[in-house]
Amino acid sequence: MMARRPYTRPISVARSAPVRPHGVLTEWNDERGYGFITPSDGGPKVFLHVRSILPFARRPVLGEVFFYKLSADDKGRPRAEEAFQKGFDERRSLPFPHSFFSCLAHSGWFLAVMPPLLLAARTGSLVGGVIAAFVQNSLLTILFYREDKYFAQYYKHQRIPEFVLHLWELLCGWPGALYAQHAFRHKRSKPSYMFAFWFCVIVNVAALFLLFRYTDPAEIGAALGETWREIVLFFD
């Protein structure tokens, strides 16, 4: 009698996330700075110019596997853009100015607060200082969103932490964040992040309301205390 083969459970294979087109660099003229990639899935060779390679990538070498964004030249021939070699997730030092902007996002809080405060003190206008904070910090928040989107694609180990982005949103940068979420299609599909974002918006608006309604800090404290007592009585 033939022995029965042991039963083995079928292995389920998860669907892999879509990846960029990729292929092997089969032709390269280093003096002229261009060559051709042979796509892994077949098809015509893809033209690669050295100016289409991302800043952090190495100088091309024949036989390397390249990931790229497929486009076409004026004559409709395939061309690689935003190309980089396999192994782009390795930890590497960030190219400037990305390293500068990352450092600014993490430790530039004085820049978020000091210029608007100085403007308000010099002009004697609290409204002017608040407007300056909204304009300045919204522009910086847009920049930080763009950088985090770049890091998410090419430098995953160097992401800007979510709490850092939320702090900039809280410091009057939320209008810029709202624009960046739609312009860069970044963060808006993550429910937990968007919940924290709208919480920052509510806190910022409430703080500004108290600031303009009560000029005396003691009055602000009394108003907060009265609001808290009303909330407690409501739930009792």
Image: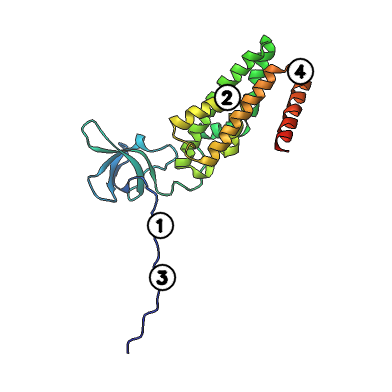
Q: Give the mark, 4 or 1, whose residue is nearer the N terminus.
A: 1
CA–CA distance in space, label 3 to label 1: 15 Å
Disc 2 from disc 1: Cα separation:
42 Å
Residue 95, visible in the rendered structure: no
Across and down, in percent, residue 160 comes to: 55, 38
Q: Percent position (x, y) of residue 220?
A: 74, 22
Q: Is residue 130 left or right of residue 50?
A: right
The tag on residue 14 is 1
- The answer for how far apart the CA atoms under marks 3 and 4 are is 71 Å
Q: Residues within 10 Å of mark 2 (few under 14, many from 20)?
A: many
Three-letter amino acid code at the position of disc 3: Arg
Q: Which residue is mark 2?
A: 137
Secondary element type, mark 3: loop
Amino acid identity at mark 2: Asn
Q: Quadrant of residue 102?
A: top right
Locate the N terminus by quadrant.
Answer: bottom left
Residue 120 in view (yes/no): yes
Residue plotted at (37% across, 47% down): 19
Q: Quadrant of the C terminus?
A: top right
Given the current orientation, which residue lies at the most extreme left position?
A: 75
Q: Amino acid at mark 1?
A: Ala
Badge nearest the viewer, 4 or 2: 4
The residue at which mark 3 appears reads as 9
Between disc 3 and disc 1, whose residue precedes? 3
Disc on res. 102: none
> Going from the N terminus, do you reach mark 2 or mark 3 first?
3
Circle nearer the N terminus (2, 1): 1
Assess disc 4: are there few (<14), some (14-19) or many (≥20) residues with their C-alpha within 10 Å of its C-alpha: few
Can you identify the residue that label 4 sits on?
216
- Residue at coordinates 51% horizontally, 46% vertically from top-left? 91
Residue 76 lies left or right of residue 92; in this view the side is left
